[in-house]
Structure formats: structure tokens, C-alpha cells
Amino acid sequence: MTQPHVEFPEHRSLGTVAMQWHGNRLELLDQRLLPNEEVWLTLDSASGVATCIRDMVVRGAPAIGISAAYGVALAARQATGEHWALSIEAAIKELAESRPTAVNLFWALNLMQKALFECRTPEAAVLRLAEAAIRIHEDDINANLTMAEHALAVMEEDSPFSVLTHCNTGALATGGYGTALGVIRRLHEAGRLRQVYADETRPWLQGSRLTAWELMRDNIPVTLNTDGAAACILAQGHVKWVIVGADRITANGDVANKIGTYSLAILARHHKVRFMVVAPFSTLDMSLSSGQSILIEERDGTEVREIRGHALAPEGVEVFNPVFDITPAALIDVIVTERGVVRNPCATGMKTLFED
Amino acid sequence: MTQPHVEFPEHRSLGTVAMQWHGNRLELLDQRLLPNEEVWLTLDSASGVATCIRDMVVRGAPAIGISAAYGVALAARQATGEHWALSIEAAIKELAESRPTAVNLFWALNLMQKALFECRTPEAAVLRLAEAAIRIHEDDINANLTMAEHALAVMEEDSPFSVLTHCNTGALATGGYGTALGVIRRLHEAGRLRQVYADETRPWLQGSRLTAWELMRDNIPVTLNTDGAAACILAQGHVKWVIVGADRITANGDVANKIGTYSLAILARHHKVRFMVVAPFSTLDMSLSSGQSILIEERDGTEVREIRGHALAPEGVEVFNPVFDITPAALIDVIVTERGVVRNPCATGMKTLFED
């Protein structure tokens, strides 16, 4: 018996996305191999998707959440017999354990769990969970498109200007289009973009490996630079905005984001270049009053000591390798979400995003 | 007939130097292979030394100048016959062409040429040129030791503190001890150093490859960090001074130095961390009124796109790869030379270094 397919609808250009849902299978672009190789993996089970999340085939908080949702939809296609619902719940649990610290992952799986509760038969679950995953995917894209419109309304420059960005926040990191890179994509579509400067973003090099690749693929003019050259670029005067994403935003507008973001915010303020943070509403964590409550997670020093197994530094040298840093709200000119923008963010301003 | 040797005298600990003069040969540590391999090359000719300079076996402006001087001394040992002086001059010319932009190289070779003029016989030249090269080497070390004493007198902190540095300005880059890293070495000797944070210094990674290696060898506590993590470290409050070297200092106190230095100066000022530049008097270029007169040289993008032949970025991506940047004097708290220090550098202050 052939199970019904629910496919992802056609969209206008969303950039080079890293996932494709084909109704009965999920295809993921192996981001570990970029930019050297473009290899697509085909997944037909939740376990396969969980492995891809764990092994960083897919990265970027929104992209992880969406992939996991499709993983649940795949689990439904394999769920038969008396305990069909339990087997889907086991898949949800397995996916939840694939990247235990990713907030978007839990958020997406929670929505999938709710959709599962509505299903009375395994046949209904196949359709309902595919629809729910597609809905999560579409909502993410729509949020990105809305953020881009909000952001463009904020940027009042008359003639095309350059921007500088950090890490990868593009179509690859999301369901499509991107957050900060979505804004940059929209600037390009509107003929308002002169040049994107992309920090290479040590130690993981998402700027070199992913952002530069994605922008070149989409014919958006990109220049790559070391993180240490950003100040030199800002001093030249062409860059009017630094545009970055966020991992978490606290109630006062402080922003946790990829290591190097805080440095950029200080450099932007010094050069009177404006600093924009673009992130979906789900990134807001109103339970934390400020960024000082966020523990700065450190990762293994091997990421700094080595690159692709080649030693760059003496064996055993001590390394300080924080994953992200905290940019205080006072250094941020505007925070953009799909629910609206907050200029000169502070606790009062952030609350306006929760008003109907 | 055995020629007489003039050997380099014993010194107190100067750190892990990258060159050793043994009277009839020069040994150079191949810095290209650090930190993975420690290979010493033995040179007995000026041509061999010129090749080592050209191929970056030895790097760091002072170290290049000293090596070249020893190269001339080696040429004297091979100069025989009627045209002995001409053959030494040919060696000077060959060495001068090895790294055409290195100011210290010409300065050292000029001193060697003057010493050659004083010699009437090839036998005299063997001794005189070896003595002159050793003198250049010793003067460099003495300048480093003097700068370190001057710098320590400026730093008034009572209890041990941490410092942050950029690139490599140590024993490896000089005749021994180091400029900025010499100051850090002296702080350690004086029991006033808590921890050195070393920027990895993209794209060449002199921080990872050389500074971390040199400090570990000398048991000076070092923590390596990506350039983008420096702001995060300064925000922690342990670092009281950022200490860097200089490639050139203009008449108003602006400093050209390795890319990333300007960024650090802005970050230091933002965090109220003091910023010190340590460089020999020969680094001063009073012919330039300010750093704005310095053309920012760019190097090939391959240095950013690849590491050890491995692609990090898409093929052909445009790269902005400036070699150095300009730190305006207003961001510098103190410039230290062997002739004295200039606090809050400006044109008037810099002139005091020229007073007797």
C-alpha cells in the first residue's frame, strides 16, 4: 500500500536551502563537507535524521528544528501495529536527544507532539505530521521574509551600501532565506546592497565555509575577511550596517550570539556604524533579565589548535574557546523579529513585542 | 688554514632564539615548520642565508636584519683573491634583494657595508664583519632588554595581572628576548605576570604557531584564543594591558602593525584596558606625519581561503586580506622604545625620543 505524500510547496527564491522534503523522504545537504563538496543525504527514518543532527550534517538552530520535525513525519510513515503512537513518541525522544541544548529543536518537537495527540489512526498521523512539519518549515520561512521587510524599513540609506556579517544565518541555517542573511538577501533583491563583507568566523569558519558559499551561489557580491580585519573594513566607511543573528535574547535586549559578535558591536559603535540583530521571536528568553545570567559555554580547544586534523598550535597548549559571547543591549541599534522591531533595545522596548 | 672564529657571547636567558652564530656557521630554526617540527638549518654562505630569508625560514624584522648581517660575515670567510671585497659586496646585494620591503634588513646591511669599508685585507674582513654582525645582534638584544625595563616601570599594577598580545614579537622574531613579548617575558621574570592571552592572529597564525610555542618552551603561562574572543577576554577584567609590537611608527605616534592590532586597540579602550606598543627606535619613521600616509598593503586571498593547501572557503571567493592596519595614536596609552617611553603619544611627545 502506497502511503500518501505531502510535499513542500513551491516558493519564490529562498536561497540555497540545505533541506528538501519530498513527501516520503528528507534530503539534507551535508554542511560538514561545504564548500569542497556538495553531497545530499537522503533520509527515510527519524533515526537517520537524528544522526544527521548529532553529526552536524545540518546546523543552525531553525534548520535543526525543522529537520527534526520532518524526522517525526518520517517516523509516522514507519509506525504500524498497536503501538504506532508509542513508536512515534520514541522517535521524538530520540530526536530531542540529538542536540540537547538547541532550543528550536525542543520547540519544534513540542509542536509535533501536540499534532500527534490529535491523531487517532496511524494513517491520519502520516498526513497530519507531514503537514505539521511543513507548517513549521513554512512558518520559519515566512518569519524570515517578514523580518527582512521590517529590517529594510529601518535602514534609511538612499544609495546602495555595504554590510558586514558574522557566522552563517542564511538559507543554510534556516528553512530558507535566512535571518540576518535574509535581510542581506532582501537588500540585494531591492537593489540596495553594494557589498557583503563576511567575517570568516573562527574557529568553525562558518563565514568562509557557508556564508561565502551561499552568497556566491546566489550571486550576491561577497568579500571574505579575517575576523581581525573587520575594524579595518569599518574604518573605510562603506559599511553602514553590521547585521548578525542571535542564539538567545534576554528580557533587557542583551544578545547571546556566536563568539566575535560582541567584538563587532564595539567596533561598529566606535566607527558609528549601526548594529542590527535579526532573530525570530522564539529566540527571546524573557525568563532571563540580562545577558549576565547566561553562562558562557566553552568548547574543546581542539577547534582552535587544529584544523581538519592539522595542528596549528603546540600540542596541549591551553585554549580559551567560548562558543558565544554576550553583546549588551546598549551596543545594539535595533533588534528585528517577525513581530516587529525594537530600536535602542531595553527592557521596556522588548516588552512591546509581546503586545497584540 | 683555519680561519679565526668570533663567537656570540653567552647571555642570560633570552628565550628560545631562532638563530645561533658559531663563528664559522649560522644555524637557523626553520620557523615555517613550527610548532610541528623543530628543524635547524646550518648555513655557511650568504646565498644560503638569503634563501632562508626569502623562503621565510626566518621572519620578524629584527631577526631578518641580524641573519643578513651574519650572512655578510659568512661571505667574508669565502672571499679570497684580488676581488675579495667585491665578492662581499655582491653578497650584500644578494641579501638586500631577499626581502625587498624589510626596513631592518637594509639598516643592518648598511652597517655591514660600513664595516667592510674599514677593512684592508680579507683576513681583517673575516674578523671585522663577524664582530659587526655580533654587534648588531647584541644591540638588538640590549634594546629589547632596555625596552622591557622601561615598560615595567610604566606598569604600576601591584599584584600579578594578565596581558593580551597579538602576532609574534618574541625571541623568535628578534635576536632574542623580544619586543612586546620581551616585556611579557620580563613581567614573568619579575613575578608580576598572571597569564598571557595570545591571539591566534589570522591569517598567518603567528600567535598559535610561534607565540604559544615560544611561551610554552619558556614555561610562561599562555592561553591561546581566536582573535574574535579577545573582546570577551577583556570583558572579564583580568587583562590590564594589551601589549603589541609595531612595523612602523609615524611622527605623530600612529602605529602600523599586524592586521588585528587596530581592532584590539579599540576593544582595549572600550574596556579601559591600557594599550602599549613596544618597538625599537629604528621603527620610527619621522618622514611620515601620520598613519594616513601609509598605504595598506594587501596580500593574496589564498592565505584566508586555504590553510596548508586545504580549502576553507569556496574557490575564487573574493578576499580582503590586508597585511597590517593603522592604530591611531589616540588609542595608544604608551609607546616604549629603548630610548624611552612616550605616554599618550602625539607629534610633540614623539620628538622627545630624539632629544639627547
Image (cartoon, coloured by chain):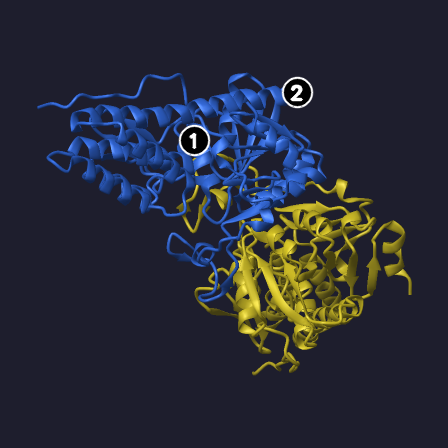
Chain colours: A yellow, B blue
Q: Chain of mark 2?
A: B
Which mark sits nearer the N-terminus, 2 or 1? 2
Q: Is residue B98 left or right of residue A351?
A: left
Give residue B243's position: percent from left, percent from top. Answer: 57, 33
Q: Nearer the viewer, residue B336 or A266?
A: B336
The residue wearing badge 1 is B214
Can residue A327 be seen at all in this image of the molecule?
yes
| Circle nearer the viewer, 2 or 1 | 2
Kindly state the secondary structure of the residue where label 2 is placed: loop
The amino acid pointed to by label 1 is: Glu
Estimate how packed mark 1 is, as few (under 14), some (14 to 19) or many (20 or more) residues with alpha carbons within 10 Å. Answer: many
Q: Chain of mark 1?
A: B
Give residue B7's position: percent from left, percent from top. Answer: 26, 21
Q: Are marks 2 and 1 on the same chain?
A: yes
Give residue B229's position: percent from left, percent from top. Answer: 60, 43
Residue displayed at 53% across by 58% down: B320
* Separation (CA) of disc 2 from disc 1: 26 Å
The residue wearing badge 2 is B156
Give the residue at the far left of this rendering.
B1
Q: Quadrant of residue A132?
A: bottom right
Estimate how packed mark 2 is, as few (under 14), some (14 to 19) or many (20 or more) residues with alpha carbons within 10 Å. Answer: few
Kindly state the secondary structure of the residue where label 1 is placed: helix
The N terminus of chain B appears in which quarter of the rendering? top left
Would you place residue B120 above or below residue A353 in this image? Answer: above
Residue displayed at 83% across by 48% down: A252
The C terminus of chain B appears in which quarter of the rendering? top right
Q: Nearer the viewer, residue B253 or B10?
A: B253
